[in-house]
Image (cartoon, helix red, strand yellow):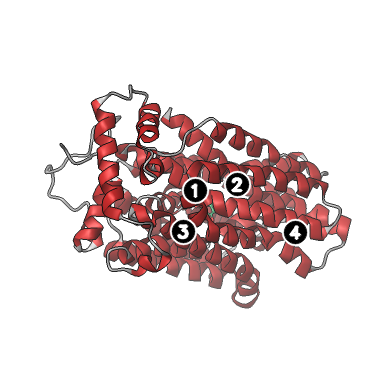
Amino acid sequence: MIYLVAAIAGMAGFLFGFDEGVIAGALHLLRTEFTITPVLEGIVTSAVPFGALFGSLVAGWLAESLGRRRSLLVAGTLFVLGAVLAALATGISVLTFARLILGFAIGLAAIVAPLYISENAPADRRGMLVSIYQLAITLGILGAYIVGFAFSESWRTMFLLGAVPGIALVAGIYMMTDTPRWLTSRGRLQEARAAIARVRDVDPQDPGVERELAAITVAAKTSGEQGRWSELLSPAVRPALIVGVGLFILQQLSGINAVIYYAPTVFKESGFDSHSSQLLATMGIGVVNVLMTFVGMALIDRIGRRRLLFLGFIGTALSLGTIALAAATSVPWLDTLAFVGLVLYIAAFAASVGPLPWVMMSEIFPLHVRAAGMSVASIANWGMNFLVVFSFPVIVSSMGLAGVFGLYAAVCAVGLVFTQMLVPETSGVSLEEIEQHLRSGRPFRSLGDRPRGQRPLPPAGGLPATPGP
Ligand code: BGC
């Protein structure tokens, strides 16, 4: 059942990737059909991150007041409406409006879906399950690249196909209950007990269910009233805010979306002459992105968040640095080097810097400010996403590929220092324990630091580590 939860919420991730990536294949058709200016082109393209910014602004409030489940239903409905409207668009303004709706749905779902998964998942598999969300994003990006290739003559078909996963999301979520944690925070304990039993596939009378409910209830009580956004700055929450927001800023400024959106351009700049070879190389990037996300999922609960982040930032810094160096010295085999460098960059990103901010965002905030904290972290994500995608062509034209990749490599090096100094280890620690640690006033970074052998990780398949009776 827990995998069903993850699969349904993962559909939201697929839509995220699909609606971002689909414009790449559609743009050249739109250019001929509507004779759009570069400014208009920019507006249509950026309508998605712009809408997402608004979606993430209201997501926290919606997730609290409507609940996680109904918020996902709203997002799913908007995904379908947006896709149909985009496919029927008679002009650029209607298309822009449709993409604003899709962006809004992405921003909303990008917060609520990981929250929905993490609040349903046992502690020892939470990281892996939330990374399913990241996997779904990468599958969505690849799906959009494939659809752009297969229906290269019809942009309407490309957009319309986005309605299919939208319908699946609505149908799937409709059959599920809300999360035990949200139900508990509303005092709906019977439903919470049933929800725990359902996702764990056990009887509601099972002692494990009672234990888990007790732990959630304690956390909900000690959390008190729903926190306001200003509470995110309180001493007990600020460390989580810094880690949540910081990881997304680093993730985006590592240049990922310059690669995702502009991969064909990058390949063109580095010597891939034909359009088909650029597209083929781009597909290669899409495939590596998906495959390496599996590697990240296998490692995230096993070697821990911090170690995986270190590996990711080292890998991204080295690969980006290599591309920058090669471009600066104009080596004759720049095309090969750029391809290998980008493959290594995507590999390191997909296994680590991609999924980890999503995983940690969904687990580090105390329950009463969790939705608000995740909103702020997501706003940082979309804001920086915007910045990178807009600035890339400008920076390339002034500093060249070497300059822009050098800049991104430097950001990844900063990521190493950030991880060392501020990021805690949360793998195998229950959400309630994370919250207790923040309240204790001890440095957030010291969470998860324990002498070897003192506190083993919970056994695979077990219930979250909760305080004993
Ligand atoms: C990022 C997206 C990015 C995607 C690429 C995600 O973790 O948040 O901005 O497009 O990874 O796979």
Whether the residue carrying mark 1 lies under 8 Å from ligand 1 is answered with: no
Q: Earlier in the sequence, mark 2 or mark 1?
A: 2
SS label for mark 1: helix
The answer to whether residue 228 is above or below residue 81 is below
Looking at numbered disc 4 in the image, what kind of residue is underneath it?
Answer: Thr
The residue to which callout 2 is attached is 75
Q: Residue at x 48, y 44 (%)?
A: 68
Left or right for 421, reference 36 = left
Locate residue 35, reporting x and y percent.
87, 62
Q: Using the rendered view, name the quadrant where residue 366 is placed.
A: bottom left
The residue to which callout 4 is attached is 96
SS label for mark 2: helix
Looking at numbered disc 2 in the image, what kind of residue is underneath it?
Answer: Ala
Locate residue 128, reporting x and y percent.
39, 40
Task: For label 4, count other residues whose C-alpha is less than 10 Å away and answer few (under 14), some (14-19) or many (20+).
Answer: many
The residue to which callout 1 is attached is 112
Q: Are marks 2 and 1 in contact (CB under 8 Å)?
A: yes
Q: Nearest to the eye among marks 4 and 1: give it.
A: 1
Find the distance from the CA under tag 3 to the CA under tag 1: 33 Å
Q: Earlier in the sequence, mark 3 or mark 2?
A: 2
